[in-house]
């Protein structure tokens, strides 16, 4: 799959994912906080399936 997640988007996804997982691990938000795995993985792998479906691309290298 082609990378479609750019720099700032990638950093935000990783940060939000880590925060949600940490909050879930400390029982602050409950089990639903483990949904943070999704933005974490999409940020690490730079591929978002929803972006592909919607035709969104925040990766500057692929905009040519």
Image (cartoon, grey):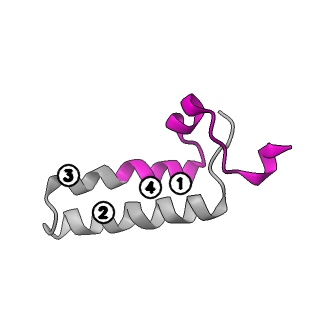
Q: Do the residues labelled 3 and 1 touch (CB within 8 Å)?
A: no
Q: Which of marks 2 and 4 is nearer the N terminus?
A: 2
> Label 3 belongs to which residue?
32
Relative height, residue 12 to residue 41 (above, below): below
Q: Earlier in the sequence, mark 3 or mark 2?
A: 2
Q: Do the residues labelled 2 and 4 touch (CB within 8 Å)?
A: no
Q: Of the numbered discs in the image, which one, if any, rests on residue 43? A: 1
- Is 22 contained in the magenta span? no
Query: Marks 3/2: CA distance?
Result: 9 Å
Query: Marks 3/1: CA distance?
Result: 19 Å
Q: Of the numbered discs in the image, which one, if any, rests on residue 20? A: 2
Q: Which residue lies furthest to the top in this view?
A: 53
Secondary element type, mark 2: helix
| Span of residues in magenta | 37-64
> Label 4 belongs to which residue?
40
Q: Do the residues labelled 4 and 1 touch (CB within 8 Å)?
A: yes
Quadrant of the rendered image containing residue 4: top right
Q: Quadrant of the N terminus?
A: top right
- On the image, the x and y values in percent for residue 16 come to 40, 64
- On the image, the x and y values in percent for residue 22 come to 28, 68
Query: Marks 1/2: CA distance?
Result: 14 Å
Q: Which of marks 3 and 1 is nearer the N terminus?
A: 3
Query: Marks 4/1: CA distance?
Result: 5 Å
- Is 46 contained in the magenta span? yes
Q: Do the residues labelled 1 and 2 touch (CB within 8 Å)?
A: no
Query: Marks 2/4: CA distance?
Result: 10 Å
């Amino acid at each position: 799959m082609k990378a479609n997640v750019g720099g700032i988007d990638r950093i935000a996804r990783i940060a939000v994912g880590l925060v949600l997982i940490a909050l879930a691990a400390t029982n602050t938000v409950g089990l639903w906080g483990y949904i943070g795995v999704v933005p974490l993985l999409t940020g690490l792998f730079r591929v978002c399936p929803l972006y592909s479906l919607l035709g969104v691309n925040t990766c500057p290298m692929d905009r040519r």
